[in-house]
Image: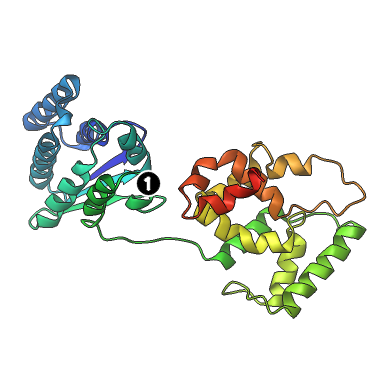
Amino acid sequence: MLIPVTARRRPIAQLLLEAMLEATGVMEQMASVRDLQIRIKDALQEKSWRDTSIIIGFLRDIQAEAQRQAFAGVLLLVDEAGKTLEYALQDRVGGDVYVFQELAEYANRQVRTPVLFLITLHQMFDDYVELSDRTLRNEWNKVQERFQNIQFSESAGTTIKLIASALQSATNLPGKASAEMDDALSEIEKGGIQLPLGLDYAEFEKIARQSWPLHPSLLLAMPYLFRRLAQNERSIFSYLTSQEPFGFQSHIEEPVDNGDNYIRLQDIYSYLLANFEAGWHACLMPNAFLKPTIS
């Protein structure tokens, strides 16, 4: 039985109850299920979800109903869980994330009717509280320790290939752009710059020409920049498609002048600073990134 939770900036306990109520709709509507639905509605109305034991109790009731109705088990899936963590930083009482720990511990104890509790995050728990006080960081680390982490991240080489396949320039490079491309690719190869795994120089040359107006040096850096300061591929393609300040779309709308019209590292710096400044401040070395803005 699936209990899907699409997180938003609200208390996680409230969202869990809402999802449980909706999930019971797929069950055979026996008297016990209807009674469970009434009790969940009352809990939401009275905001009794602030007591995390209420959440565990309702999950136990759903688990029992699932067993009676021959479900193999219960899958509780919280997608975009980072939004609830961001909310918890603003509301330390209503947004208490301790319920994550309680649910993880409860799921780990189940044998007869298994409960699988999964959450998806764009970064680790402690990354969300990197700038908070030590006490809060320690508390959230204890929650994180109750989970087994499965990290999914595209390799830099794969990300570069995705960027190139999304662009696929339909025109030949202008004269100065072509000359700059040749020089840049030559410097990369002669300088022995290590390419990401899965790429050789011949393939990278083809990809780089396909990715104009992104400069080859920027193309190599993009996966690492967006992985650390934003949300990896998701933010890269937001950059390519959105109308955000200093974004890719605003650049390509400009007429091709007598220059090479490349987008370089300094242009991405302006884009990230304008749109992801919070991420820059959360970086391990924020002063190093922000210093150019005040010099």
Q: Nearer the viewer, residue 25 or 251?
A: 251
Query: Would you place residue 223 above or below residue 67 in this image?
Result: below
User: For this view, does 32 lie left or right of residue 93?
Assistant: left
Give residue 252's position: percent from left, percent from top: 77, 44
Residue 240 visible in the shown view: no
Query: Would you place residue 185 above or below residue 232 in this image?
Result: below
Give residue 112's position: percent from left, percent from top: 7, 56
User: For this view, does 260 lie left or right of residue 215?
Assistant: right
Disc 1 element: helix
Residue name at image x 12 percent, y 36 percent? 58
Give residue 68's position: percent from left, percent from top: 7, 44
User: For this view, does 221 lie left or right of residue 62?
Assistant: right
Give residue 191's position: percent from left, percent from top: 72, 78
Residue at the disc numbered 1: 128
Residue name at image x 64 percent, y 37 percent? 244
Residue name at image x 52 percent, y 66 percent? 155
Q: Nearer the viewer, residue 282 or 18?
A: 282
Q: Tell me the quarter of the picture where residue 241 sits.
A: top right
